[in-house]
Image: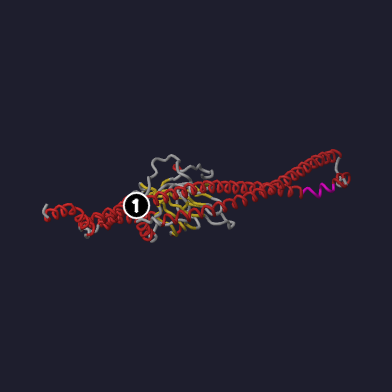
Amino acid sequence: MPPWRGAAVLLTCLWPFALAAQEAGAPESGAAADLRDTQRNESEHRAAAAAAAARAAAAAAQAARLEDARTAALARERQAEEESAEAMQRLAALKARAAAAEAARQATAAALQRLLPLAVRLSLYPSETLLAAPAPPETAISGVLVAQGLAREIAAETASLQRETATIAALSAEIAAARDKLQADIATQTALAASLDQQISAAAATARAQTDAASTAAREAAADAAHAADLRAALARLAADRDAARKHARDAAEALARRHADAAATRAAHERAALLAAPSGPGLGAPRRALIAPVAGALIGHFGAPGEAGPAQGISFQPPPAARVVSPCSGRAVFAGPFRSYGVIVIVDCGEGYDFVLAGMQRPTLDVGQALRAGDPVGEMAQDDGSPHLLYVELRHHGAAIDPVPWLRVDHGSRGG
C-alpha cells in the first residue's frame, strides 16, 4: 500500500477525536451560555420562591398561633373584668343596704332617746311617778295601763335596735369580704392584662411589617376629621376622604397603565387601589344581638333617655377600673384620639355605612388604619381613682345615630358580655 494511503487512513481515524478535543477546548458559544444562565436563574428563582413561601407559611402559622393565644387571653380577661364588675355591683348594693340599716338604727335610737328619761324614772320609781300628780283613781289606772304599753313599745324598739345593729355588723363583714374579692379580681384582671399586652405587642410587631396603603389613607383622613365641628361632620369627612383616596389610587393606577410604566410600579399602584377599594368590614346586617359588648360592666345609660342636650344618642356602660375596651365588630379603626367634648374616642368602621363610636376610655391601644376583628382590643379604661368612669357607645348608620343594643349581647340594666 502506498505511503500516502496509509497516512490518509490514519487521519480519517483520528479526525473525530481531534474534533472532539477542539470542541472541548474551544470557548462556549453565546447562545449556549445564555441558555445555561437562564436555567441557573430559573433554578435560583424557584429556590427563592420556595424559601419565601416557606417563610410566609411559617409567619402565617405564627400569626395564627398569636391570634389564638390573644383571643384566649381576651376571653380570660373579659371573664375577670365581668367578675370585677359583679363584685363592684355587690359592694355597692351592700353599702346601700348598710346605709339603709344605719338610717333605720338612727331613727330607732332617736325615738328611744325621747322616751328614755321617762323609762328610767318608771323603772326606778314606778309608784312615785304614777302618783306624783293628784288624779282620780280611774285616771291613775289609765296611767298604769299607758305605762305598761309604753314599756312594751320601748322593749320592741330596743329589740329592733339590737337587730339593726346586728344587721349592720353583718353587712360590714360582707362589705369587707366583697372589697377583698374586688381587690383580688382587679389583681387577676391586671395580671391577665399585662400578659395580653405582651401578646398584643408581639402581634403588632408582626402587623407593622404589613402596613398597607389603607392605613396611610386612614391616618390622613383621621387628621382631617379631628377638626370637624361635631361627630356627624367628622364621620362625613372620614367617608369623603376615604372615597377621595380610593378615586386617587384608581386614577393613578390607570394613568400608569396607560403610559406603559414600569411593571412593578403599575402592579404596586393596582394593589394600593385594590386595598383602598376593599370594604372596611362586613357590615352588621339585621339586629340580632350577635356582637360582643365593647366592655364588661352594667349598662346604665340608655338610648333616647332625656338629658340636658336632648335625647341620648348612645348608651353607657359602667366597667371596672382598667377594663379592656374591644371592638364590637370586624372592620377598620378610622379614628383614635381626643375629639371635642367626647374625650378620647375610637371610631370603628364596620362596613356598609355602620360606625361604632367608643368614648370615655383613658387611652386607645391601636393605630389608625388598623384592621380589626370583633373582640380585638381598642383601648383601656382609667385606673381606680375612687370615681366611676363610663364608656359611652354610639352606633351610627351613614352618620345617623341608632340604638346599638339590638345588635349587642347585653340586656338593659344587666352586665355586658
Is residue 319 found inside the magenta-colored segment of the image?
Answer: no
Query: 144 and 193: which one is in front?
Result: 193
Query: 256 and 293: which one is in front?
Result: 256
Residue 264 against residue 81 in the figure, above or below: below
Would residue 300 be seen by someone viewing this image from the given angle? no
Q: Position of residue 129 (x, y in %)?
A: 86, 46
Q: Is residue 276 left or right of residue 28?
A: right
What sort of colour scheme is used for the picture?
secondary structure
Q: Position of residue 54 (x, y in %)?
A: 39, 50
Is residue 116 found inside the magenta-colored segment of the image?
Answer: yes
Q: Which residue is mark 1?
A: 47
Query: Which structural element holds mark 1?
Result: helix
> Image point 18% across, 52% down: which residue?
13
Query: 307 and 289: which one is in front?
Result: 289
Q: Position of residue 346 (x, y in %)?
A: 44, 54
The crowding category of the residue bearing disc 1, from other C-alpha atoms within 10 Å (few below 14, some 14 to 19, many at least 20), is: few
Residue 283, picture quadrant: top left
Q: Position of residue 397 (x, y in %)?
A: 38, 47
Would residue 407 be seen by someone viewing this image from the given angle? yes
> Image point 76% across, 45% down: which residue?
162
Which residue of the protein is positioned furthest toward the front in this rendering?
1
Q: Disc 1 marks which amino acid?
A: Ala
Q: Is residue 126 left or right of residue 377?
A: right
Residue 345, picture quadrant: bottom left
Q: Main secondary structure of the magenta part?
A: helix
Residue 240, picture quadrant: bottom left
Query: 304 and 409: which one is in front?
Result: 409
Residue 127 against residue 272 in the figure, above or below: above
**For the magenta stretch, what is the residue range?**
114-121
Q: How many marks can you see?
A: 1
Q: Is residue 19 left or right of residue 205?
A: left
